[in-house]
Amino acid sequence: MTLALHGIGVSGGYAIGRAQLYSHARLEAPHYVLRPEHIESEIARFTAAVESVHAELLALQTHIPGGAPTELSAFIEVHALILSDSMLSQAPKKRIREEACNAEWALAQQTEALIAQFESIEDEYLRERRHDVRQVADKVLKSLMGHPGHAPLKSVAEGESILIAHDLSPSDMVLFKRHTFAGFITDLGGATSHTAILARSLNLPSVMALHNARSLIRENDWLIVDGVAGIVIVAPDNAILDEYRLRQNQWLLEQKKLRRLKTSPSITLDGAHISLQGNIDLPSDVPQALGENVDGIGLFRSEFLFLNRDDLPGEEEQFEAYRAVAEGMRGRPVIIRTLDVGADKSVRWMADTSVNPALGLRAIRLCLAEPQIFITQIRALYRASHYGKIKILLPMLASLSELDQALTLIATARGSLRIENIPFDAEIEIGGMIEVPAAALAAEWFARKLDFLSIGTNDLIQYTLAIDRTDDAVAHLYDPLHPAVLGLIDHTLRVGQKMGKPVSICGEMAGDPRLTRLLLGMGLTTFSMHPAHILSVKQQVMRSHVGELAPQVRKLLRAGRPERIQEMLERLNNSNTE
Ligand code: PEP
Ligand code: MG
C-alpha cells in the first residue's frame, strides 16, 4: 500500500530507490560479494576477530587496576557475555554463507537486527543494553577492518539505496561522504542541525523530522524522497513513480541550466559586487568549492577534523590540513573557524555530561576551559598562514572577556612561534562569529577588537527564539524571518558599516535563494554557503537591484506580523527589476 510521510525537506532534489535501514556499522562497513571459494576463509576471518576481542576483554579483566570502580569488572563481563551469544558470534557466519557477503557487512546486518529487537523491549534496563551490543559489535568490526580479507568479486552498488535512520549524528554524516547513497531520511532532526547542513553539503535529496519513518519502512521497500516538498512516498504505484521520474528530470535540467552561471561575475543590476564564498567541512571539500568558482572559503568548520576518532588531532596533522586548504584555494581567502564542538557535534574524548549541551561548554567556551587544545590549533593555523590567505574565526562569543582571553591565548601561540623562528603571516585577520544574541546586541564592542564579523544565523536563530535546532518537535517554530532575528542581523550589519568592519553571513540563511534579495536589501555584500548553493544564489544576485530593494526591505523590517513579513518577502522576490 502506498504511504506518504511528511517531514522537513532539508536538501533538494528527488531520489527514487530501495530502503536500507541504517546501522552505524553499516556506514563504517564495506559491502562486497565474495567468490564462492573464499566463503570458508571469510568465516574463519570472522571467527578470528571474535576470538581476538574475547582475548582483549579477558586481558582487560585480569589487569583491572586496584583503584578502578567495581562496576568495571561487571561491565567487561557483560560485554564478554554478549560476545559469546550465538546471535552475535554465530549468526553472522550464516549470513556470510547464505549471502556470500564479507564479514564486516554480515556483522553490521546482524547487529542492526539485534538492536531492533532490543529497541522493542519494554523494560528500560534491558532496552539500554542495546548500547552494549553496539559497542561489542564495533570492537569486532574494528578487528575485522584491521585484518582485511580477500578481494571482492564485486562491490555492491549503493547508488539506488536510500538510507533510513531514526537519527543521524554529524559524525555519521561525515562517514556518509565516503558512500554513494541516493538519499536519506530520518525521524528526528531540525533543518539547521549539523546533520542537515552536512546533508546539504552532500547534495543528497533528504527529508528529516519524519517522526516514525524508521518503524514504518521495511528493508528494501521502494521509496521516493522528495527533498523539495519534504515528503517521502513508501511503495509508490507506477503512476506516482512516472510523475516523480518526470520531476526528477526537470530538476536535473534546471541544475544543468544553472551551471551556465559558473563563470559569470556576481554583480547586481546596479553594479554592486557581491562576494559568494563557500562553507566546507574537510580539506577534501576544496575541489567542489573551486568547481563552483567561490571567491574564497567563508567558513571551514575545523571541528570535523576532530570527529569519529578517539584522540585529538595534533599540531602537525592540523597544520597539514589547514595548509592543504590554504594552498588548494590558490590565494583566495580562507576563513578557518576554531574548534566548535559540543552540542550536537560530540567528540569521543569529551565527557557528555552537560544537562543542556547547546547552552553548555561548547565552542570557544570549551577552548578556553582547555587552553592547550586551543593553543595547539592556533599554532597550526598560524603555521599554515605562511602558505595562503588564512583568517581565523572564533565561534560562539558571548562576552568580551571570552574574546580577551582568546586573544591572549592567540598572542601566546604567536609568541611561541616567533621564539622558534617559524614563519607565519603576521597580518592574519581575526574575526568573531555573531551567533549569540548578546554578541549581536553588543556587536559594536566586539567589532572594536576584531577585524571582521561573521553572522552564524543557525545558532543566532536557535538562541534568539529558544528553539533547539536539532529538535524536530519545535522545528516548525524555527523562523529565520522572525522580526527579532532580522533585527539582530540588521543591527550587526549596521555596526559593521559604521565601524568599517566587514560583516558576512555564514549560516544557512546565506545559501537560501529565497532570502538573497532580503539580505541584499539589508546591505549584506558577503555570503558564505555550501558550494552547492552558490549558483542559485548568484542567479538571484544577478537579477537584483540593491538600490530598489533597500527601501522595500526597510519596510519589511518594520512589519511585525509573520503573515505580513511573508507577503512582503514574496513581493520582494517576485518584483521584476530585470
Ligand atoms: C551558524 O551557527 O550559523 C554557523 C554557521 O555555525 P554552525 O552551523 O556550525 O553552528
Ligand atoms: Mg554556529
Image (cartoon, rainbow, N blue to C red):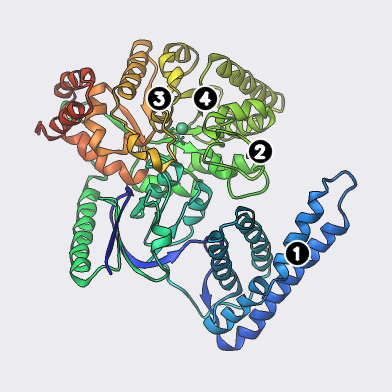
Residue 464 spot, x, y in % from top left: 40, 25
Label 1 SS: helix
Q: Which mark's residue is nearer the viewer, 2 or 3?
A: 3
Residue 358 spot, x, y in % from top left: 52, 33
Are there few (<14), some (14-19), or many (20+) residues within 10 Å of tag 4? Answer: some
From this viewpoint, which residue is outermost toward the right?
A: 66
- Give above or below for 464 relative to 254: above
To which quarter of the image does residue 180 belong? bottom left
Q: Earlier in the sequence, mark 2 or mark 1?
A: 1
Q: Earlier in the sequence, mark 4 or mark 3?
A: 4
Are there few (<14), some (14-19), or many (20+) residues within 10 Å of tag 2? Answer: some
- The quadrant of the picture showing ligand 1 is top left
Q: Amino acid at mark 2?
A: Glu
- Give above or below for 450 relative to 568: above
Q: Amino acid at mark 4?
A: Ile
| CA separation in Å, label 1 and label 4 | 53 Å
Q: Amino acid at mark 1?
A: Ala
On the image, numbered disc 2 is attached to which residue?
315
To which quarter of the image does residue 485 belong? top left
Q: Earlier in the sequence, mark 1 or mark 4?
A: 1
Are there few (<14), some (14-19), or many (20+) residues within 10 Å of tag 3? Answer: some
Instruction: Determine the residue positioned at 42% across, 15% down.
Output: 443
Label 2 SS: helix
Q: Is residue 181 visible?
A: no
| CA separation in Å, label 2 and label 1 | 38 Å
Q: Earlier in the sequence, mark 4 or mark 2?
A: 2
